[in-house]
Image (cartoon, rainbow, N blue to C red):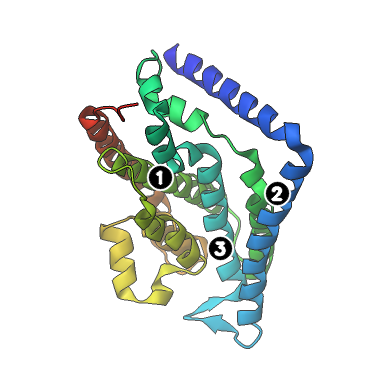
Amino acid sequence: MKLKENVVLYLRYAAVCTQGIMQYKLSFVLMVFARFMISFCELIAIKFLFSGLTQIRGYTYGEVLLCFSIVQMSFTFAELFGNGFKVFSGMVRRGAFDQMLLRPRSLILQVIGSRFEVGRTGPLLTALVTLVLGIRHSQMKWNLLAVWTIIAMITGGTLLFIGLFMLEASLCFFTIEDTSIMNALTYGAKEHGKYPMDVYGKGVVRFGTYVIPYTLVQYYPLQVLLGKSQHWYLAFCPLGIVVFVILCYGVWRFGVKQYQSCGS
Protein backbone atom coordinates (compact mmCIF):
# COMPACT_ATOMS: atom_id res chain seq x y z
CA MET A 1 0.00 0.00 0.00
CA LYS A 2 2.86 2.35 0.87
CA LEU A 3 4.51 1.63 -2.46
CA LYS A 4 1.33 2.53 -4.29
CA GLU A 5 1.06 5.81 -2.37
CA ASN A 6 4.69 6.67 -3.20
CA VAL A 7 4.13 5.97 -6.89
CA VAL A 8 1.01 8.15 -6.93
CA LEU A 9 2.87 10.92 -5.12
CA TYR A 10 5.81 10.72 -7.54
CA LEU A 11 3.43 10.96 -10.50
CA ARG A 12 1.96 14.10 -8.94
CA TYR A 13 5.45 15.53 -8.52
CA ALA A 14 6.19 14.76 -12.18
CA ALA A 15 2.89 16.28 -13.30
CA VAL A 16 3.57 19.51 -11.40
CA CYS A 17 7.11 19.77 -12.79
CA THR A 18 5.86 19.10 -16.32
CA GLN A 19 3.11 21.71 -16.00
CA GLY A 20 5.68 24.24 -14.84
CA ILE A 21 7.95 23.53 -17.81
CA MET A 22 5.08 23.66 -20.29
CA GLN A 23 4.21 27.17 -19.17
CA TYR A 24 7.08 28.18 -21.45
CA LYS A 25 6.37 26.04 -24.50
CA LEU A 26 8.87 27.71 -26.80
CA SER A 27 11.62 27.30 -24.23
CA PHE A 28 10.66 23.63 -23.86
CA VAL A 29 10.78 23.01 -27.62
CA LEU A 30 14.13 24.77 -27.94
CA MET A 31 15.55 22.77 -25.03
CA VAL A 32 14.45 19.44 -26.52
CA PHE A 33 15.76 20.44 -29.95
CA ALA A 34 19.11 21.64 -28.57
CA ARG A 35 19.69 18.46 -26.59
CA PHE A 36 18.63 16.39 -29.59
CA MET A 37 21.16 18.17 -31.81
CA ILE A 38 23.97 17.74 -29.26
CA SER A 39 23.45 13.99 -29.09
CA PHE A 40 22.85 13.83 -32.85
CA CYS A 41 26.27 15.42 -33.41
CA GLU A 42 27.79 12.57 -31.40
CA LEU A 43 26.12 10.16 -33.81
CA ILE A 44 27.54 12.09 -36.76
CA ALA A 45 31.00 11.92 -35.17
CA ILE A 46 30.78 8.12 -35.06
CA LYS A 47 29.67 8.10 -38.69
CA PHE A 48 32.69 10.19 -39.73
CA LEU A 49 35.01 7.98 -37.70
CA PHE A 50 33.86 4.89 -39.58
CA SER A 51 34.02 6.63 -42.94
CA GLY A 52 37.63 5.52 -43.18
CA LEU A 53 37.36 2.35 -41.09
CA THR A 54 35.45 -0.89 -41.35
CA GLN A 55 35.81 -1.80 -37.69
CA ILE A 56 37.39 -0.78 -34.37
CA ARG A 57 38.94 -3.58 -32.33
CA GLY A 58 36.62 -6.05 -34.02
CA TYR A 59 33.44 -3.95 -33.69
CA THR A 60 31.60 -2.80 -36.80
CA TYR A 61 29.74 0.47 -37.32
CA GLY A 62 26.37 -1.11 -36.52
CA GLU A 63 27.67 -2.76 -33.35
CA VAL A 64 29.10 0.53 -32.06
CA LEU A 65 25.78 2.26 -32.83
CA LEU A 66 23.97 -0.39 -30.83
CA CYS A 67 26.32 0.15 -27.89
CA PHE A 68 26.05 3.95 -28.14
CA SER A 69 22.25 3.93 -28.29
CA ILE A 70 21.87 1.76 -25.19
CA VAL A 71 24.24 3.89 -23.09
CA GLN A 72 22.64 7.12 -24.38
CA MET A 73 19.17 5.84 -23.53
CA SER A 74 20.24 4.72 -20.06
CA PHE A 75 21.83 8.07 -19.25
CA THR A 76 18.80 10.00 -20.54
CA PHE A 77 16.40 7.99 -18.38
CA ALA A 78 18.72 8.48 -15.38
CA GLU A 79 18.75 12.25 -15.93
CA LEU A 80 14.99 12.27 -16.34
CA PHE A 81 14.21 10.36 -13.14
CA GLY A 82 17.26 11.11 -10.99
CA ASN A 83 18.03 14.74 -11.81
CA GLY A 84 17.08 15.77 -8.29
CA PHE A 85 20.29 14.17 -7.03
CA LYS A 86 22.34 16.19 -9.53
CA VAL A 87 21.08 19.51 -8.14
CA PHE A 88 21.07 18.35 -4.53
CA SER A 89 23.90 20.67 -3.47
CA GLY A 90 21.64 23.63 -4.24
CA MET A 91 18.90 22.14 -2.06
CA VAL A 92 21.32 21.88 0.85
CA ARG A 93 22.60 25.44 0.47
CA ARG A 94 19.06 26.87 0.25
CA GLY A 95 17.86 24.89 3.26
CA ALA A 96 15.32 23.01 1.12
CA PHE A 97 16.63 19.68 2.37
CA ASP A 98 15.96 20.76 5.97
CA GLN A 99 12.33 21.23 4.99
CA MET A 100 12.24 17.75 3.45
CA LEU A 101 13.44 16.25 6.73
CA LEU A 102 10.33 17.62 8.45
CA ARG A 103 7.91 15.94 6.05
CA PRO A 104 6.61 12.42 6.76
CA ARG A 105 7.64 11.15 3.33
CA SER A 106 10.60 9.34 1.83
CA LEU A 107 13.59 11.65 1.40
CA ILE A 108 14.62 10.03 -1.87
CA LEU A 109 11.08 10.38 -3.22
CA GLN A 110 11.10 14.09 -2.38
CA VAL A 111 14.55 14.65 -3.90
CA ILE A 112 13.88 12.92 -7.22
CA GLY A 113 10.36 14.31 -7.37
CA SER A 114 11.60 17.87 -7.03
CA ARG A 115 13.24 17.87 -10.48
CA PHE A 116 11.46 15.95 -13.24
CA GLU A 117 12.75 17.60 -16.39
CA VAL A 118 10.88 16.27 -19.40
CA GLY A 119 12.94 18.66 -21.53
CA ARG A 120 15.87 16.26 -21.20
CA THR A 121 14.13 13.75 -23.47
CA GLY A 122 15.84 15.20 -26.56
CA PRO A 123 18.73 12.69 -26.49
CA LEU A 124 16.16 9.91 -26.12
CA LEU A 125 14.96 10.61 -29.66
CA THR A 126 18.52 10.27 -30.94
CA ALA A 127 18.98 7.07 -28.94
CA LEU A 128 15.85 5.53 -30.46
CA VAL A 129 16.96 6.38 -34.00
CA THR A 130 20.45 5.06 -33.28
CA LEU A 131 19.05 1.86 -31.78
CA VAL A 132 17.07 1.17 -34.95
CA LEU A 133 20.14 1.86 -37.10
CA GLY A 134 22.32 -0.28 -34.84
CA ILE A 135 19.94 -3.24 -35.01
CA ARG A 136 19.72 -2.85 -38.77
CA HIS A 137 23.48 -2.68 -39.40
CA SER A 138 24.73 -5.07 -36.70
CA GLN A 139 22.86 -8.11 -38.05
CA MET A 140 22.13 -9.29 -34.53
CA LYS A 141 19.91 -12.32 -34.12
CA TRP A 142 16.53 -11.68 -32.56
CA ASN A 143 15.35 -14.08 -29.85
CA LEU A 144 14.04 -13.88 -26.30
CA LEU A 145 17.55 -13.65 -24.89
CA ALA A 146 18.35 -10.68 -27.15
CA VAL A 147 15.17 -8.86 -26.07
CA TRP A 148 15.95 -9.53 -22.42
CA THR A 149 19.55 -8.34 -22.87
CA ILE A 150 18.56 -5.00 -24.40
CA ILE A 151 15.93 -4.33 -21.72
CA ALA A 152 18.31 -5.40 -18.93
CA MET A 153 21.14 -3.23 -20.27
CA ILE A 154 18.95 -0.13 -20.48
CA THR A 155 17.34 -0.72 -17.07
CA GLY A 156 20.63 -1.62 -15.42
CA GLY A 157 22.38 1.35 -17.01
CA THR A 158 19.66 3.69 -15.75
CA LEU A 159 20.03 2.36 -12.21
CA LEU A 160 23.83 2.59 -12.46
CA PHE A 161 23.77 6.28 -13.37
CA ILE A 162 21.10 7.05 -10.77
CA GLY A 163 23.30 5.31 -8.20
CA LEU A 164 26.23 7.52 -9.25
CA PHE A 165 24.02 10.61 -9.00
CA MET A 166 23.08 9.46 -5.49
CA LEU A 167 26.76 9.16 -4.57
CA GLU A 168 27.33 12.67 -5.89
CA ALA A 169 24.48 13.94 -3.73
CA SER A 170 25.85 12.08 -0.71
CA LEU A 171 29.10 14.08 -0.95
CA CYS A 172 27.06 17.22 -0.25
CA PHE A 173 26.52 16.06 3.34
CA PHE A 174 30.23 16.50 3.93
CA THR A 175 30.91 19.44 1.62
CA ILE A 176 28.34 21.74 0.04
CA GLU A 177 30.92 22.99 -2.40
CA ASP A 178 31.25 21.84 -6.01
CA THR A 179 31.06 18.05 -6.37
CA SER A 180 31.77 18.06 -10.11
CA ILE A 181 34.56 15.54 -9.58
CA MET A 182 31.80 12.94 -9.91
CA ASN A 183 31.23 14.11 -13.48
CA ALA A 184 34.26 12.03 -14.44
CA LEU A 185 32.28 8.95 -13.41
CA THR A 186 28.92 10.00 -14.86
CA TYR A 187 29.45 12.09 -17.97
CA GLY A 188 32.81 10.40 -18.46
CA ALA A 189 31.14 7.00 -18.51
CA LYS A 190 28.53 8.29 -20.94
CA GLU A 191 31.21 9.53 -23.32
CA HIS A 192 33.41 6.45 -23.11
CA GLY A 193 30.36 4.20 -23.19
CA LYS A 194 29.82 5.08 -26.85
CA TYR A 195 32.27 2.29 -27.61
CA PRO A 196 32.60 -1.17 -26.02
CA MET A 197 34.86 -1.01 -22.97
CA ASP A 198 37.54 -3.36 -24.30
CA VAL A 199 38.32 -0.81 -27.02
CA TYR A 200 40.15 1.20 -24.34
CA GLY A 201 42.23 -1.72 -23.04
CA LYS A 202 42.16 -4.27 -20.23
CA GLY A 203 42.83 -1.68 -17.53
CA VAL A 204 39.58 0.14 -18.26
CA VAL A 205 37.68 -3.15 -18.35
CA ARG A 206 39.06 -4.05 -14.91
CA PHE A 207 38.15 -0.61 -13.52
CA GLY A 208 34.66 -0.94 -14.98
CA THR A 209 34.27 -4.37 -13.39
CA TYR A 210 35.78 -4.07 -9.91
CA VAL A 211 35.44 -0.34 -9.08
CA ILE A 212 32.45 1.19 -10.87
CA PRO A 213 30.52 -1.66 -12.56
CA TYR A 214 30.04 -0.12 -16.00
CA THR A 215 30.89 -3.40 -17.71
CA LEU A 216 27.92 -5.16 -16.09
CA VAL A 217 25.53 -3.06 -18.16
CA GLN A 218 27.67 -2.54 -21.23
CA TYR A 219 30.60 -4.79 -22.11
CA TYR A 220 29.60 -8.24 -20.84
CA PRO A 221 25.93 -8.35 -21.94
CA LEU A 222 26.92 -6.69 -25.22
CA GLN A 223 29.10 -9.70 -26.04
CA VAL A 224 26.04 -11.94 -25.83
CA LEU A 225 23.88 -9.50 -27.78
CA LEU A 226 26.37 -9.36 -30.65
CA GLY A 227 27.02 -13.08 -30.65
CA LYS A 228 30.67 -12.65 -29.63
CA SER A 229 30.28 -14.88 -26.58
CA GLN A 230 28.50 -18.20 -26.08
CA HIS A 231 28.20 -17.62 -22.34
CA TRP A 232 24.48 -16.83 -22.21
CA TYR A 233 24.62 -16.05 -18.49
CA LEU A 234 26.50 -12.83 -19.23
CA ALA A 235 23.14 -11.43 -20.34
CA PHE A 236 22.13 -11.41 -16.68
CA CYS A 237 25.11 -9.31 -15.53
CA PRO A 238 22.95 -6.13 -15.31
CA LEU A 239 21.19 -7.70 -12.32
CA GLY A 240 24.40 -7.11 -10.37
CA ILE A 241 23.71 -3.37 -10.50
CA VAL A 242 21.14 -3.91 -7.75
CA VAL A 243 24.02 -4.58 -5.35
CA PHE A 244 25.76 -1.37 -6.45
CA VAL A 245 22.59 0.69 -5.94
CA ILE A 246 22.18 -0.81 -2.44
CA LEU A 247 25.75 0.25 -1.62
CA CYS A 248 25.03 3.75 -2.93
CA TYR A 249 21.90 3.87 -0.80
CA GLY A 250 23.98 2.84 2.23
CA VAL A 251 26.33 5.79 1.62
CA TRP A 252 23.29 8.07 1.27
CA ARG A 253 21.81 6.86 4.55
CA PHE A 254 25.15 7.36 6.29
CA GLY A 255 25.30 10.92 4.96
CA VAL A 256 21.77 11.67 6.13
CA LYS A 257 22.66 10.52 9.66
CA GLN A 258 25.73 12.78 9.67
CA TYR A 259 23.83 15.81 8.36
CA GLN A 260 23.58 18.65 10.88
CA SER A 261 21.51 21.25 8.97
CA CYS A 262 22.76 24.05 6.73
CA GLY A 263 22.13 26.59 9.49
CA SER A 264 19.58 28.63 7.53
Residue at which label 3 appears: 68
For marks 3 and 1, give the CA distance: 20 Å
For marks 2 and 1, give the CA distance: 22 Å
Residue 214 horizontal side relative to residue 261, left or right: right
Q: Residue at x 60, y 67 (%)?
A: 65
Within the image, what quadrant is residue 211 found in? bottom left
Determine whether the residue tagged by mark 1 lies in a helix, strand or loop: helix
For marks 3 and 2, give the CA distance: 19 Å
* Residue 144 percent location from the top left of the image: 55, 48
Determine whether the residue tagged by mark 3 lies in a helix, strand or loop: helix
Q: Quadrant of the N terminus?
A: top left
**Label for residue 165?**
1
Q: Earlier in the sequence, mark 2 or mark 1?
A: 2
Q: Earlier in the sequence, mark 3 or mark 2?
A: 2
Determine whether the residue tagged by mark 2 lies in a helix, strand or loop: helix
* Residue 88 percent location from the top left of the image: 41, 38
* Residue 244 percent location from the top left of the image: 31, 45
Q: Amino acid at mark 3?
A: Phe
* Residue 172 percent location from the top left of the image: 32, 41
Residue toward you, 75 or 175: 175
Residue at which label 2 appears: 32
Q: Are marks 3 and 2 in contact (CB under 8 Å)?
A: no
Q: Residue at x 39, y 28 (%)?
A: 95
Q: Is residue 64 above or below residue 221?
A: below
